Image (tube, rainbow, N blue to C red):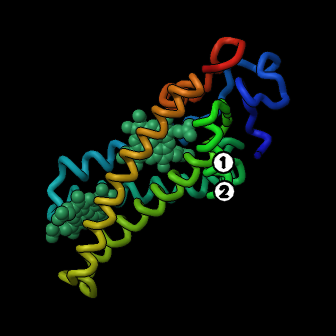
Amino acid sequence: MTEATFTTGKGAQAPDPAAAPRDIRVWDPLVRLIHWSVAAGVFVNAAVTDPEKQPHELVGYAILALVLLRLVWGLMGPRPARFTSFPPNPLAALRHLWGLFHGARGVHLSHNPAGALMVYNLWATLIGMGATGIMMTTPRYFGIEWVEEAHEALFAWLMLSVALHIAGVLLDTALTRVNLVRAMLDGRKRLPPQGPAG
Ligand code: HEM
Ligand code: HEM
C-alpha cells in the first residue's frame, strides 16, 4: 500500500481514522479539468459529431492531447496524481475487491488498486482510439478495413469500460461513504463521520 492509503471501519489498521484529517485535498485542478473534458469529449464524439467530418477529428485530437498531458502530469504532478501513488497491480486490485465485499473500508488518497487498473485501461483505450482515428486519415491507412474495425472495436470496449468505471465509482462510494464524484468535482475527499463505516 502507498502512504497515500489508510483504512477505516472493520479490519481497521493504523493510523486510527479518528485521528486522521476528515477533509483531504486529493485531485488538483488539472486532473479534474482533464477528467471532465475527456469525458465530455468522448460523449461529443460518440453522440454528436459526424465521424466522417472534421469536428470529429478535432475533438478526437483534443482528447488525445489531454490524455497525453495527463500522462506527463503522472510523472511530475502532485502526489495523488502520480503513477507511483496508483501502480498497476492486479493482485492488489483483487485483494481490494475481496476486502470491499468482506467489510474492509479502504479509503485511498489516490485511485484504489482496482480503480487504478481501470484508469490505465481507459487511457490505453483512448490512445488506441486516437491512433486508429489518425491512421484512418492518412493516405497509407485510408480505407483499410482492419483500422476502421479496430477504431469501432475500441469504441465498444471504451463504452463497456466507462460503464464499469461508473459502476465501480458508485459502488466504492456506497461502501466507503466517501463521495468520489464530489471529490473529482471539488478536489476533496471527505471522510464519513467518525466511527466504523458501513
Ligand atoms: C467517457 C467518460 C469517462 C471517461 C473516459 C473517464 C475516465 C476517467 C479516468 C481516465 C480517470 C482517472 C483520472 C485521473 O487520474 O486523471 C477517471 C476517474 C474518475 N472518474 Fe471518470 N471517466 C468518465 C466518466 C465519468 C463519469 C460520468 C463519472 C461520474 C459518475 C466519473 C467519475 C470519476 C471519478 C469519481 C473518478 C475518480 C475515481 C477515484 O477516486 O479513484 N467518470 N475517470
Ligand atoms: C478518442 C476519441 C474518439 C472517439 C470516442 C471516436 C468515436 C468514433 C465512433 C463512435 C465512430 C463510428 C464508428 C462506426 O462506424 O460504428 C468513429 C469513426 C471514425 N472516427 Fe473516431 N473517435 C475518436 C477519435 C478519432 C480521431 C482522433 C480521428 C481522426 C483524427 C477519428 C476519425 C474517425 C474516422 C475517420 C471514422 C470513420 C468514419 C467512417 O465511417 O468512414 N476518430 N469514431
Answer with the quarter of the image where residue 109 lies. top right
Residue 162, how many percent across, how many down? 38, 48
Label disc, if present, on residue 91 of the rendered structure: 2
The structure residue drawn at horizontal position 25% and vertical position 66%, both measured from the top left corner, is 152
Is residue 65 or residue 173 the one in the foreground? 173
Is residue 196 or residue 159 the one in the foreground? 196
Answer with the quarter of the image where residue 5 lies. top right
Residue marked by disc 1: 95
The structure residue drawn at horizontal position 29% and vertical position 67%, both measured from the top left corner, is 153
Report helix, strand or loop for mark 2. Answer: helix
Q: Within 8 Å: ligand 1 and the Cβ of disc 1? A: no
The structure residue drawn at horizontal position 29% and vertical position 59%, both measured from the top left corner, is 156
How crowded is the residue under tag 1: few (<14 C-alpha within 10 Å), some, or many (20+)? few
Pointer 1 with pointer 2, Cβ within 8 A = yes
CA gap between label 1 and label 2 equals 6 Å
Is residue 192 or residue 134 the one in the foreground? 192
Residue 83, how many percent across, how many down? 66, 54
Q: Amino acid at mark 2?
A: Leu
* Residue 33 visible in rendering: no
The structure residue drawn at horizontal position 74% and vertical position 39%, both measured from the top left corner, is 4
Answer with the quarter of the image where residue 148 lies. bottom left
Q: Amino acid at mark 1?
A: Arg
Q: Can you say whether 196 is above or below 2 in the image?
A: above
Q: Which quadrant is home to the C terminus?
A: top right
